[in-house]
Amino acid sequence: MSRLQNGWATLATSARDVRARWKNPRGINIAFHRGALVGGVLGLLFATALVALYLDGALTLAARRLPGDVRVIFVQITKLGDSLYIFVLSALGIVIPLLMRGKPGVNRAYDSALAYLAARCFYVFTVAAFSGIVSQVLKRMIGRARPRLYDQFGEFHFVIPGFPAVYASFPSGHAITAFACAVAVGYFIPRLRWALLALAVLVAASRVVVGSHYASDVIAGAAIGWLSAVLARRAFAARGIAFRLAGGHILVKAAGKIGPALRGNSGKPVS
């Protein structure tokens, strides 16, 4: 069997394994503070409503008065919230490591590290896809006019369903993607967690600066993105993909071991 054929066979086997795991989740007994979750959601809804009532219009007008150079910078920043490159990178991060598995002469640590890397990328891809679907459904159901129509209708104009895109302001899809991916990647690289969240805040703010969304749109988007990553982690942990359960807590599989294994520092399997 050629290397390419072997790679595709490994990819197919991995896909079957994921499908089998997904159909048979384990009962998870982890601390899930529903009261705190409900309180947090209600608090965010209240904050979103307050911002919508008292700040959306003012911040939209303030953004229009910003110097052109500032707006040019934020036009570039806002591109980081585009989900397309997230899908492409995470998909490549799934397929390439799996195609590389099973090569003759490769130590077990390297081979298992490739599998764990693919699982992490699968989680990020799923988070981006799930949060993106939620974003599109809500946009069409709510149908809020974007700030470009503020002078005509004000900040509370709705056309349901939200077609065309000028009536798809709430929530901000870019904010959802930015926060969903920042939280998701932050689980695997904790030392970058705050930097990733700061970048997500910049992306969310850029949507107001460039006039694509109101402030309340991005606050709601940030909350939805964050919650998407949290719920997806719970679902993955129940199936033993990328995460594992230990003592009632969710832990990352092979934490701190993938990098050394890929550099060939160990011949032991990664677990």
Image (cartoon, rainbow, N blue to C red):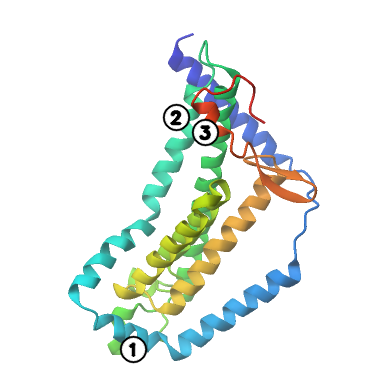
Q: Residues within 10 Å of mark 1 (few under 14, many from 20)?
A: few
Q: Residues within 10 Å of mark 2 (few under 14, many from 20)?
A: some
The kind of residue on which mark 1 rests is: Phe
> Nearest the camera: 163 or 242?
242
Could you tell me which residue is drawn at 48 percent across and 68 percent down?
221
Alpha-carbon distance for marks 1 and 3?
A: 54 Å
Query: Is residue 160 among the parts visible in the rendering?
Result: no
The kind of residue on which mark 2 rests is: Ile
The kind of residue on which mark 3 rests is: Gly
In the image: residue 94, left or right of residue 211: right
* First-in-chain label (1 vs 3): 1
| Residue carrying label 2 | 96
* First-in-chain label (2 vs 3): 2
| Residue carrying label 3 | 259
Q: Quadrant of residue 203?
A: bottom left
Q: Residues within 10 Å of mark 3 (few under 14, many from 20)?
A: some
Alpha-carbon distance for marks 2 and 3?
A: 16 Å
Alpha-carbon distance for marks 2 and 1?
A: 49 Å
Quick one: SS at disc 2? helix
Point out the frontmost of discs 1 and 3. 3
Query: Across the whole image, how many numbered discs are drawn on residues?
Result: 3
| Residue carrying label 1 | 153
Could you tell me which residue is drawn at 74 percent across and 45 percent down?
245
* First-in-chain label (2 vs 1): 2
